[in-house]
Image (spheres, rainbow, N blue to C red):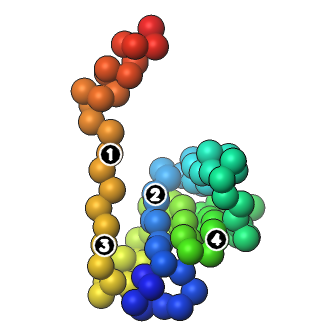
Amino acid sequence: MAEAVGYTDYFVIVTGANPRLTKAIAEEIVIKLRPVRHPSRVEGERDAEWILIDYLDVVVHVLTPAARDFYRLEALWGDVPRLPLSEPSAQGLKAAASTQA
């Protein structure tokens, strides 16, 4: 994003199935990052269709599927390079679960 805009380096775009889930996702992001980062602002928590968490160099967008389809952030910023994020593998999750049992 730094090449396209001057106010942030990265956008993280996340989808939650419904407003309740988007709110839970946003809350968990803030909680998990609290030991090392504090957002400069959080917007959209009330309606929870699109929650924006601004860490200045990273802006996190948590959207419902309807909001993501409507605002189409990926299309709006389509010329900006994407960094793929890997999801934990099913095997990795199974291994972690078995060590905790």
Q: Marks 3 and 4, how far apart in space? A: 19 Å
Vertical arrangement, residue 32 with respect to residue 95, above or below = below
* Foreground label between 3 and 2: 3
The residue that label 4 is drawn on is 54
Vertical arrangement, residue 31 with respect to residue 2, above or below = above
Vertical arrangement, residue 70 with respect to residue 32, above or below = below
The residue that label 2 is drawn on is 15
Mark 1 or mark 4, which is nearer the start of the sequence? 4
For mark 3, does the 10 Å Cα neighbourhood hold few (<14), some (14 to 19), or many (20 or more) residues? few
Q: Which residue is drawn at the image coordinates 63% and 69% (left, top)? A: 55
The residue that label 3 is drawn on is 82
Mark 1 or mark 2, which is nearer the start of the sequence? 2
What amino acid is found at the position of numbered circle 1 in the picture?
Glu
Q: Are marks 4 and 2 in contact (CB under 8 Å)?
A: no
Question: In which quarter of the view is residue 43 placed?
Answer: bottom right
Q: Marks 4 and 2, how far apart in space? A: 17 Å
Q: Is residue 27 visible?
A: no
**Where residue 27 sits in the image (x, y, percent)?**
66, 49
The residue that label 1 is drawn on is 87
